[in-house]
Amino acid sequence: MNTDSNKQERLRALPAVDRLVGLLDMHDAAAAIARSVKVRAARDTIDAYRKRILQAPEGFAANDLSDAAILQAAVARAEYLNRPKLRRTINATGIIIHTNLGRSLLARSAIENIAEIAAHYSNLEYNLEKGKRGSRYTAVEDILCEISGAQAAMVVNNNAAGVLLCLDTMARGREVIVSRGELIEIGGSFRIPDVMAKSGAILKEIGTTNRTHLRDYENAISADTALLLKVHTSNYRILGFTASVGLNELVELAARRNLPVMEDLGSGTFIDFSRYGLVHEPTVQESIAAGADIVTFSGDKLLGGPQAGIILGRPERIDAIRKNPLTRALRIDKMTLAALEATLRLYRNPEQAVEAIPTLNGITRSKEALRPRAELLLRAIEAIGNPRIHSAIVDAASQAGGGSLPLLEMPSLAVSLDISGLGPNDIEIALRNQPIPIIGRIESGRFVMDVRTLCDAEIGVIAASIELIASASVEKSP
Ligand SMILES: *Cc1c(COP(=O)(O)O)cnc(C)c1O
């Protein structure tokens, strides 16, 4: 038989979509799956078979095109399509604020508060004392001022929105002076010059990449100047022959020229990390005390709360920001507010915050404090009892991530994993494709799991997954 008629015959043997959906309807494994998903699965499966037949019609064994075989493929596809797309993962990368893996984990009290507020009506925009409409921002305004020392506060969807909103309010159509050393790009295409352009403010860059002096700001100020902006160089550092102007000096200059100063702190922390033997990261309290008119930062970076943009500053500035029509488009939702308020409440007692907020706990934990967890994971892997699996506790270096504390490498512990017959890439892919995906890293040609970003409850899941991939790979080898 020539290839063409071979192809035609095989294509004709494929079931129609309706018939395959009918077969899925009768199959137990697909019983709980919605019809719309079964239709997609049937189409995808038939399409995939058609492509394979057109590409390599001879590459089929006798019963590869039987109803049973095609149905099995369709069931697998339906199960795949039916899985939630946003799923929990296990972060074994050692990167604590991993933007791709969801940044900060919430404290228990924040999670509970989300459930409480989501399940019930709330006073989101209702003033209980007056019995009439209230402000959405009341929930966190007082506590933000209490912790930071600011006089007024406001929150939006994220820090990018916060920066955009502040620039739009304070500098639309006018000039904003920024040092060239601070024209940052962070992940997800947030670039200061682009955000500036979107806000309608005009960027006036000054100084050089490595050195900017107070006189550069002074010389750039004109009648068109609306704002002096300082941006925290979150995710990189300029080292060597450098100079930049501190917030204090900038505030003093701005006061003389009757201009406001805004600082985008990026991560923003209420905790002085130098107290835990780590590098000093400028705190929110310091920026407020230095006299910045507006300070913005993220809720889900070093703060360890939900995605949010926090704006602190002088009452008249915050008032103008609130009245900006853009605020409505960037507003924070009630579940975020619930999580944010609960997180902020923990900061009333900094020791409690460091204990209860996973991001802070992850950053401040010493390498030796991680050893019990590393040993637990090692023992769980050894208990599988498969002679093809070899693991050991190795030294590692964790990172804060999220563009925070970029040069900080935290000494950490990891557990390496070798499975004879599988390369590190095979292990990485297999663990990433588990029902609860496990994301580790490959270091010096070996798969490793940093235990800093794990919790003890995940150890059993990891061991079960390793057992599964090791035994699945045995079956395949000759
Ligand atoms: C992360 C960051 C932002 C953006 O914050 P999001 O909360 O991710 O929107 C803005 N500016 C700086 C300096 C940052 O580090």
Image: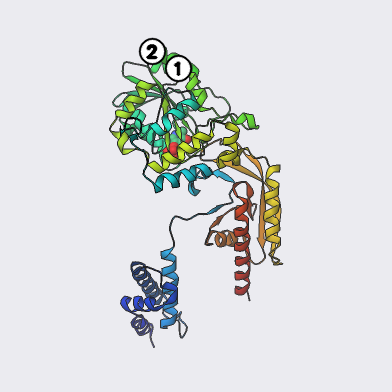
Q: Are marks 1 and 2 in contact (CB under 8 Å)?
A: no
User: In the figure, 7 relative to 466: above or below?
Assistant: below
| Quadrant placement of the N terminus | bottom left
Q: CA distance from mark 1 to mark 2?
A: 10 Å
Report if the beta carbon of the residue with label 1 is closer than 8 angstroms to ligand 1: no
Res 24 seen here: yes
Helix, strand or loop at disc 2?
loop
| Quadrant placement of the C terminus | bottom right
First reached walking from the N terminus: tag 1 or tag 2: 1
Residue 305 as seen in the image, left or right of residue 466: left
Residue 464 as seen in the image, left or right of residue 56: right
x, y (%) of residue 353?
57, 35
Quadrant hosting ligand 1: top left
Report if the beta carbon of the residue with label 2 is closer than 8 angstroms to ligand 1: no
Q: Residue at x 63, y 53 (%)?
A: 448
The quadrant where residue 231 appears? top left
- Per the image, the residue denoted by label 1 is 251
Res 65 seen here: no
**Amino acid type at mark 1:** Val
Helix, strand or loop at disc 1?
helix
Q: Residues within 10 Å of mark 2 (few under 14, many from 20)?
A: few
- Per the image, the residue denoted by label 2 is 257
User: In the figure, 472 relative to 177: above or below?
Assistant: below
